[in-house]
Image (cartoon, rainbow, N blue to C red):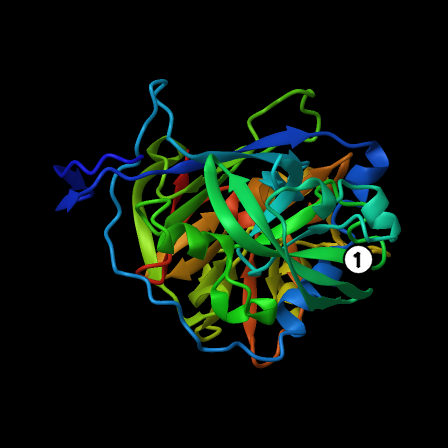
């Protein structure tokens, strides 16, 4: 199992006494697409965000008790790698996902590890939707550890409802095995949002309070069963150029139970959770073209399952106007690629620190076209007003999610 050897270490400028942590790694790989897929890869972003942020009827304030802890260095294997990690595939900077296994013997699935939701679901063999036939489907008859539950499960999207039922089985990810994990088998998947996706399902990593049907998220089980010593996970998201060669495996990595110091530079800057539900911290202000906007503080959900930076509609329009961006038929803002070097820096201020993106960071170069990374959506109560800080930002900044201390850490990605 794990070693419980106490050792004095230096973390930042603090001397902390820690146990050696069990840490799981989830690598992120990269895959490629056709030219048509590249151009339209962001077309269904809005459908998914409607469910996650605008259709949430309430954010329950129930909390699972988690003990406070400090961050310790991760355990390393004989090859000098973090003990537990999940490689992530990169669908041309639009979708990041990795592999999990369900059942005995294990059935593999690719899922988006989504900090903007809290449920695990995969397609079922009971599903007849086109999206299910285009992806791997869970077969309970082929698992010796399957346990029936049968509770109805539904998530509303802009194009319809994803429907199914709750089941229970053994989950394995990043070398960590969670027995008796409840998850949803989808029996109906609407529209083209999931039919065109390169992943099979979604594994939510937000707080238990927004879980549909109160299902306990996998990471909570890992913490409460002492499967990992630190109630922390972290994301490194790689960047793929528009003309990158195939078979490039530098997609990124999810680390369960700690952080990977090789993926970031300098100190981790912490911001407290504003309210539990999403990993929502306070956005104090933004700075664009050298000027502060003085918008007033509001929430910002750090969301690995979203591709773009989503702002209130009026803010998105103002930013894109200053970029001289033009909206196309799909609702994407297009920028003249020849102007990128002259476009201004964009900064977000969290807990007194500026996190800045250059135009090379926030403009997405897709098959000869340049798409603005700023999308408008007005998210009202109870979730909003809210910004959604997605992969456009998280490719530049390594993100750490501390469940014990309810805080998010950001550091410059290496």
Q: Is residue 14 visible?
A: no
Which of these two is toward me, 366 or 407? 407
Left or right: 315, with 219 as reference point: right
Question: x%, y% of residue 233?
Answer: 41, 47
Q: How many discs appear?
A: 1
Q: In this view, which residue lies farthest toward the front?
A: 144
Which image quarter is the N terminus in? top left
Element marked by disc 1: strand
Within the image, what quadrant is residue 360 found in?
A: top right
| Residue where numbered disc 1 is placed | 187
Does residue 301 appear to the left or right of 307 in the view shown? left
The image shows residue 117 at horizontal and vertical percentages of: 57, 61
Q: Residue at x 68, y 20 (%)?
A: 245
Task: Report the residue at 50% width, 77% height from top.
Answer: 60
Q: Is residue 367 visible?
A: yes
Camera-nearest residue between 99 and 276: 99
Tell me if mark 1 has few (under 14), some (14-19) or many (20+) residues whose alpha carbon lies within 10 angstroms of its own.
Answer: many
Quadrant in the rendering for residue 76: top left
- Quarter of the image where the C terminus is located: top left
Q: Position of residue 32 (x, y in %)?
A: 73, 29
Viewer-side residue, 87 vs 211: 211
Q: Can you say whether 89 is above or below 159 in the image?
A: above
Q: Residue at x 72, y 54 (%)?
A: 325
């Amino acid at each position: 199992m794990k070693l419980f050897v106490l050792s004095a270490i230096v973390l930042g400028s603090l001397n902390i006494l820690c146990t050696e942590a069990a840490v799981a790694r989830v690598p992120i790989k990269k895959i490629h697409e056709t030219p048509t897929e590249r151009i339209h890869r962001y077309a269904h972003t809005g459908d998914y965000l409607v469910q996650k942020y605008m259709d949430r009827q309430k954010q329950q304030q129930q909390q699972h008790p988690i003990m406070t802890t400090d961050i310790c260095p991760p355990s390393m294997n004989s090859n000098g790698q973090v003990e537990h990690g999940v490689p992530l595939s990169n669908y041309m900077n639009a979708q990041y996902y990795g592999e999990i296994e369900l059942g005995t013997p294990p059935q593999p699935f690719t899922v988006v590890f989504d900090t903007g939701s809290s449920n695990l679901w995969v397609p079922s063999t009971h599903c007849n939707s086109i999206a299910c036939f285009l992806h791997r489907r869970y077969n309970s008859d082929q698992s010796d550890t399957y346990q029936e539950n049968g509770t109805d499960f539904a998530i509303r999207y802009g194009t319809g409802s994803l429907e199914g039922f709750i089941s229970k089985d053994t989950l394995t990810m990043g070398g960590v095995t969670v027995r008796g994990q409840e998850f949803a088998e989808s029996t109906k998947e609407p529209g083209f949002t999931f039919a065109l996706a390169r992943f099979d399902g979604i594994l939510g990593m937000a707080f238990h309070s927004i879980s549909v049907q109160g299902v306990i998220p996998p990471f909570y089980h890992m913490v409460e069963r002492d499967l990992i010593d630190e109630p922390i996970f972290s994301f490194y998201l790689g960047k793929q150029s528009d003309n990158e060669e195939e078979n490039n495996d530098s997609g990124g990595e999810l680390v369960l139970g700690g952080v990977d110091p090789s993926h970031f530079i300098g100190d981790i800057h912490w911001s407290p959770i504003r309210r539990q539900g999403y990993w929502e911290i306070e956005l104090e202000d933004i700075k664009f073209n050298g000027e502060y906007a003085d918008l007033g503080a509001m929430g910002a959900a750090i969301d690995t399952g979203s591709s773009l930076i989503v702002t209130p509609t009026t803010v998105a329009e103002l930013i894109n106007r200053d970029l001289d961006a033009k909206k196309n038929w799909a609702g994407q803002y297009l920028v003249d690629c020849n102007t990128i070097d002259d476009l201004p820096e964009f900064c977000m201020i969290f807990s007194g620190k500026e996190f800045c993106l250059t135009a090379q960071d926030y403009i997405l170069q897709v098959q000869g076209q340049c798409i603005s990374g700023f999308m408008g959506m007005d998210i009202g109560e109870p979730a909003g007003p809210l910004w959604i800080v997605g992969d456009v930002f998280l490719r530049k900044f390594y993100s750490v999610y501390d469940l014990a201390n309810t805080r998010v850490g950001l550091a410059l990605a290496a």
